[in-house]
Image (tube, grey):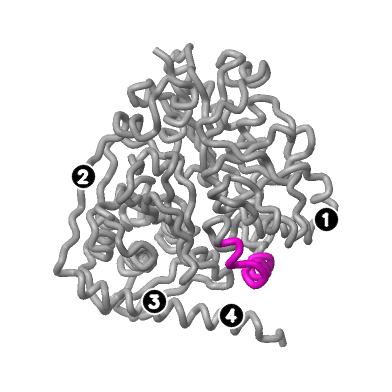
Amino acid sequence: MAHLIGIDIGTQGVKAAVYSTDGECLADAFEPSQPRRPAPGTVEEDPEFQVASTCRLIRECVGRTGAGEVAAVAVAGQMAGVIGIGSDGRAVTPYDSWLDTRCAPQIRRLQEAAGEAVLRATGNAPSFNHGPKILWWKEERPAGYATIATFVQPGAYTAMRLCGMGSEKAFIDSTYLHFSGFADSRARRWDPDLCRAFGVAPEKLPRIVEPTERIGALNAAAAAATGLRAGTPVVAGCGDTAASFLACGATAPGLCVDVAGTASVFAATTGAFAPDFQGGTLGCGPSATPGLWHPYAYINGGGLNLEWFRRELGGAAGDDGGLEALDALAARVPPSDTLPLFIPHLGGRVSPGWPLLRGSWAGLSWDHGRAEMFRALLESVALEYALYQRALRRLLPDAVFTELRITGGGEKSALWNQLKADVLQLPIVQIDRGGGAPMGAAMVAGVGAGVLPGLPESAARWVRLGRRFEPDPSHATLYQHRLHQYESLLQHLHEWSAAADSTPAA
């Protein structure tokens, strides 16, 4: 039986998994990332560490399964950051992470000069993604920029290194284009007017491919490092979020997805390309499934906030400071309008792009402790999702959305799932056999290698649904009021942060 390998170069680390062609995960392995934060706002990673992690994890999985015949490998990865590579295909910059906020001035300039044009072409307003980051390197590191042959993302970089490719074969698959700042997402090409307007040479941008395209094969060095045979096909893969959507079976209009990971992502599946011109809240990204689109929005650290709270405020080890213990504490707190509100944008708001906004609690009293504060963190994601849901209904008033399927580490919290169901008044459905982005990448690998049928058919075979959380109608009025309070607080803090930024220093 042929086997398939899916890789996810995620924010928390790299994960590899070996799948059979009927969707059984035979082995998986994980290695944590090594982010660097040398200065405020700076978040970088070493691309070569990501490549080496991938090779080590493949070797571990292959060793445990004896998976001798691997039909293909595909790599998913973080979507909104960039790596500059030289002509030999090797990195000449660190990975400029999607969590890195140094490009805030470039976001503002893109918004002011061509925000509507970028949204119309790409489906996404300027934010902490490729366009502003490329401009940051161009303007703030001109000497380094001159050495860059092209910009790629971690998934493509790792796939290229596995195949020994130079920059002339650099690629970006279509699921990333909404983050590009310079692409015509529908036409699957670079937009010459946007490139010209910001002085970005098209040669600095990679060729555009589809996720299931075979882009090369393992060279001898990669084969030796991974334990696979040289010549094993490497398929383009897709963004980690797009791969997670596949692993939830979101391959038909009407299905929504919650990726409860480091980022908290809310997305729908539609047959229409629908940029959000009115509010700029939703992006619209190409699906890995041909002909479909994913209107989406996300909190760039929704899940990261939980780990931050645990580390800084959760208490000492053994003192009810673990995430499961904090979740259990918060579950004892009944819904109430007297609970504090939390703004989850500790690294700036992405959807829409409010880069100066930061996190905050409001409404704290002496009656509130860790349980109430942690519950506010969980509730804030649900309330932010409700704003995304409202934007989605405004954008596509005739569309019907039936359920929200959840993936990622946060799906383990029954409290969080029920909060989301009650705030959104939409059923939340767990995935019983879901492997997240590595599973989606393995599906893409199988279709690209010809050992699986199309992506919708493969998802129907591989994905199994689990527990369902139904909304409690008796909580609808309470959470509508909480949403009104949350939105008001959000707007006031946005105005305050903008005013503070424009105030001259003493």
> How many C-alpha atoms fall within 10 Å of the one at disc 4: few (<14), some, or many (≥20)?
some
Q: Find disc 4 in the rendering and name its residue.
A: 498
The quadrant of the picture occupied by the N terminus is: top left
The residue carrying mark 2 is: 467
Q: Secondary structure at mark 4?
A: helix
Q: Which mark is residue 142?
A: 1
Position of residue 494 measured from the top left corner of the image (x, y, whole percent): 51, 78
| Residue at image point 33% right, 78% down | 484
The mark that comes first in sequence, 1 or 3, is 1
Q: CA distance from mark 1 to mark 4?
A: 29 Å
Q: Which residue bears the numbered disc 3?
A: 487
Cα distance between the residues tagged 1 and 2: 52 Å
Q: How far, Cα to Cα, is label 4 from label 3?
A: 17 Å
Residue type marked 4: Ala
- Residue at image location 33% in from the left, 37% down from the top: 434
Residue 75 locus on image (x, y percent): 53, 33
Q: Residue at x 51, y 43 (%)?
A: 239
Q: Secondary structure at mark 2?
A: strand
